[in-house]
Image (cartoon, rainbow, N blue to C red):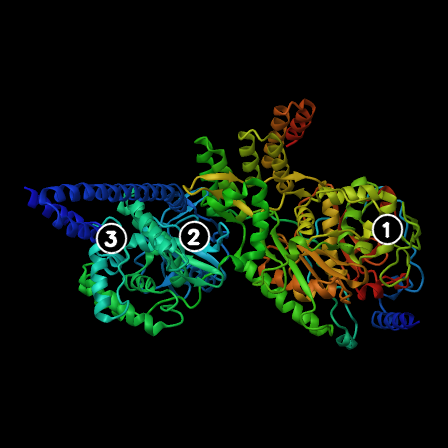
Amino acid sequence: MTTSKKKNTKKTQKKTSKKVIKKSVTKKKSVKKSTKKKSSKKSQSLFWKWFKRVFLFGLILGLIVLILLFLYTHHLYKTEVPKFEGRRWSVPAEFYAQPQELYVGAKASASGLETDLLDLGYKRSSRINAPGDFSRQSNVIKVYVREFQFWDGLQASKQLQITTRAGSVTELKNLQTGRNEAIFRLDPLSIGRLFPGDGEERIIVKLSEVPIELQQGIIAIEDRKFYEHFGIDLKGIVRALIADIKAGAMVQGASTLTQQMVRSYYFNNDKTIKRKVNEVLVTILLERKYEKEELLETYFNEIFMGQSGGRAIHGMGMASRHYFNKPLRELKPHESAVLITLLRGPSYYNPRRYPERVLKRRNLVLNIMHEQGAISEEQRDFAQLQPLTVSEKPPAGISDYGAYLDIVKQQLKRDYAEEDLNTVGLKIFTTLVPVTQKIAEASVKKGLEKIEKANNLKANSLQAAAIITSVDGAEIQALVGGREASFEGFNRALNAKRQIGSLMKPFVYLAAFETGNYSINSTLKDEPIEIVQKGKDEVWKPENYNKEFSGQMPLFSALARSKNVPTVHLGMEVGVEKVMQAAARSGLEKTPLAYPAMMLGSMSLAPIEVAQMYNTLANSGYRTPLRSVRAVLDEQGQPLQRFPLEVEEVFDNDSMTQLNSLLHLVTQKGTGRRLQSLMPNFPVAGKTGTSNDYRDAWFSGFSGDLSTVVWVGSDDNHNTGLTGSSGALPIWGDIMKQVAQIPFALTPNDNLDMLQFDFSTGYLMKDCTRGENDVLLPAKLTVHEQAEFIRCSLGQQVPTKDEDKGGFFDWLRGD
Amino acid sequence: MNKQKHLLLLSFLILFLLPACATSWPDPYEKPKPVVVSAPEPVFIPEPTPEPPVVETMALPDSRVGTATPIEIPAPTPVIEAEPELAAVVALRGQAQSSLSNGEPAMAAASIERALRIQAKNPILWLDLAEIRFAQQEFTQAENTAKKALAYAGNKRDINKQAWTVIANSRYARNDKDGGLRAEAEAARF
């Protein structure tokens, strides 16, 4: 018994620390010298004493470690795991452009549609088998349109045949039913995402949207035992260790998908013990908390897939967009294999930079996918024959439409909490028209270069802004914040407050018409005037552009020729306050102070404010607040808030008809008549503006469908020598001749009559045929004005006359 | 001085080219003396008809005409014309109608707005939208939108009548009885 006990104790002793063993051995030696019984008893009690101490110490230490580990794990569970939970739902807001509407009569060409489809990531193919395919044979396009959740409902996927002729759609046929479709829209272009500020881009996908080959392929390559292990693959680690030892280097990783996901989340690749411990613990915690499918879905959305400029590409959804410019669900097996290849190092296997390296690895991946049963032999053979099919360059990121998105964000901020915009996966439908935006950007860039050259200005010394809105809907279709659209910086369209000059004049005339005391051919004074302004010592003596006075002139030519002095006389008669109120009613937030000089536009406004004012004029006096957002959907596709079309009549129809006919006259015979050669036979209306010392050049005007404002100047506000006519009008004309489709026209008005006037004298003409110097304008005449007119003998013209009065040659010189 | 020279030359040319008409032309140097006719009736020119851009009335007597350059005459200010009926617009109006009867006026408004993006100046669509706004009990917007329908209605009697009716009802709904009566009287005119 005792010997066995002894043996046992020896064994136990061995298990304890070396120090203890040594001590017990010395004790044994001394014990041998004394009697066996005594010594054994003594040694036993001594041993037990030590043993108990050590055991207790170990127990307490172990307990403390366990408690600490538990606390730490619990801490991780409380802090890190919820991050993943949050991450699964933290989807940035996505912004879309206006969708392209297709219907018989819609303006569209086959080549234009082809470009649109390619921009949307549709793929040309001989047969349209799946959503995202299209084919074109001369003027006929067949397209398998993708399903899309719009703000007013889900539009199912459809196979369509679109026939175009002479620039418009002539037939729209559903290939599945053989019937004609009345109206259909393409899925809208995604123009950017708003991130939670960490510079990460992602498109969240559901597991069901991930192609099955990609799912099985990733498990086959990265983590074969994914469905069996508890988060850590112990066998795998051993296997990898053996492989590493054999090779004498790190050749095989044994990280499970969950581990990779956790690592990708921490993102930094430092190899500290703490990070490794955290990784293992969090992995095990996540595995306990979530189902394998949930983890796999998170993996697909979390994994790091590359870098693009300052943005990290996370998740397979974003990677599919970034590398192939199409939705994940449309990926073919050979493309899935490229994404799997990328997992082994997105920069080493960057397919745009190292296509050969990627192709080689991709084919290897395809082999393994086949071996593991993810794809069939035929699939593998076919896939290995395919080229890389990576898109030439990544699709638009947020910076490409940065200037436009500034106004969108501004308008959203009025209606949403910023954190909602950042965290919840909103879908925001903007009113941007990508084609119009492209045209406007190009016109601004090209136009400024031309203007600099033509006026001997230093290259790149000028800046510009432009805003294009639809007339009746008041939707902002394009917004240019500077000459380099891709450069994110100061957005002049929204933030550059500049003097508007003569753009203010129409409101003087509008206020005059509203009084009912003036008609289109009233006579205005054009003689020196001195005005003492409140609070200012200096007497204001406005002058005409040519510094001459003609005595008097008809109202319509005073506005058409942008005469300062007659405008000031008119404004003083009407009342400066009324003029400012009219300007404010067109859509200014505040009524400008009623200083007389304000009538000639000494106030500073941003182009976006001018856009609102002139949109109201374009709308014949109905003000509709400009909007850049049509609808917002939450992540479940439910509409959060609609921004309905609102209108308010702020100017009466008679006043507006007269004013707009004058703004039309500006472009025919006034300061904007250059448009006659830029846009021949396409009526438009508008006004030039030039601020003091040629600091700012403006042109603001409209066709029947679009209202556009262009500002040109320099950032340091110096004299450019440009007028509205020479600096801004050419760009305006270049934009409008490409995008405007409906010519300017007056709204019908029974209270006014179209009358013929002599342009220089303003005399009403009777029985005269049309001549070069007369104009037809809608008018409501006072009794006095009805009395005076020139009568022609039947079939005759009134000759050009009375040019001494100064008009004709003055206005040739412009604003 | 220079101007005068130009004018002199120009008027000589005109006088030379048009000897037959010379008698009826006023002297270009004098300030024009308006012919005062004691006519109480306004002298109105009827609806403008587009004319070719070249002056065709100058029946010139001899071959020297060849040197005359054509003069551009500004076209009369165009007036908005009625828009043609489009199948797409008909379909969208149908959608709006069914949304409205399903008690989804917001959806109905979305369909009409979509149609308005195709035909922005179609008064029928503005009238539809006005009626939807009324159904949404947005009475101010209903009136404003109906006015927009009026702006594009021209002399279409039925649209004028219906738009004024919407305006009248919107005013009554806002307890503006006088305004409502006035609008009703307007509606009765059509």
**Circle 1 residues within 10 Å: few <14, some 14–19, many ≥20:** many
Point out the frontmost of discs 2 and 3.
3
Element under label 2? loop
**Circle 3 residues within 10 Å: few <14, some 14–19, many ≥20:** few
Q: Amino acid at mark 2?
A: Asp
Element under label 1? helix
Q: Nearer the viewer, residue A115 or A41?
A: A41
Q: Residue furthest left?
A: A1
Q: For residue A568, which numbered disc appears in the image?
A: 1
Q: Residue A681 location in percent, x, y?
A: 65, 62
Horizontal arrangement in the rendering, residue A385 relative to residue A325 (left or right): left
C-alpha separation, residue under disc 2 versus residue under disc 3: 77 Å
Q: Amino acid at mark 3?
A: Lys
Q: Residue B166 location in percent, x, y?
A: 60, 30
Element under label 3? helix
Q: Nearer the viewer, residue A75 or B78?
A: A75
Pointers 3 and 1 in contact (C-beta within 8 Å):
no
Pointers 2 and 3 in contact (C-beta within 8 Å):
no
Residue named by callout 2: A187
The answer as to whether the residues below labels 1 and 2 share one chain is yes
Q: Earlier in the sequence, mark 3 or mark 1?
A: 3
Q: Quadrant of the N terminus of chain A?
A: top left
Pointers 1 and 2 in contact (C-beta within 8 Å):
no
Q: For residue A236, which numbered disc appears in the image?
A: none
Q: Earlier in the sequence, mark 1 or mark 2?
A: 2
Q: For residue A19, which numbered disc appears in the image?
A: 3
The answer as to whether the residues below labels 3 and 1 share one chain is yes
Horizontal arrangement in the rendering, residue A554 relative to residue A329 (left or right): right
Q: Residue A128 location in percent, x, y?
A: 32, 59
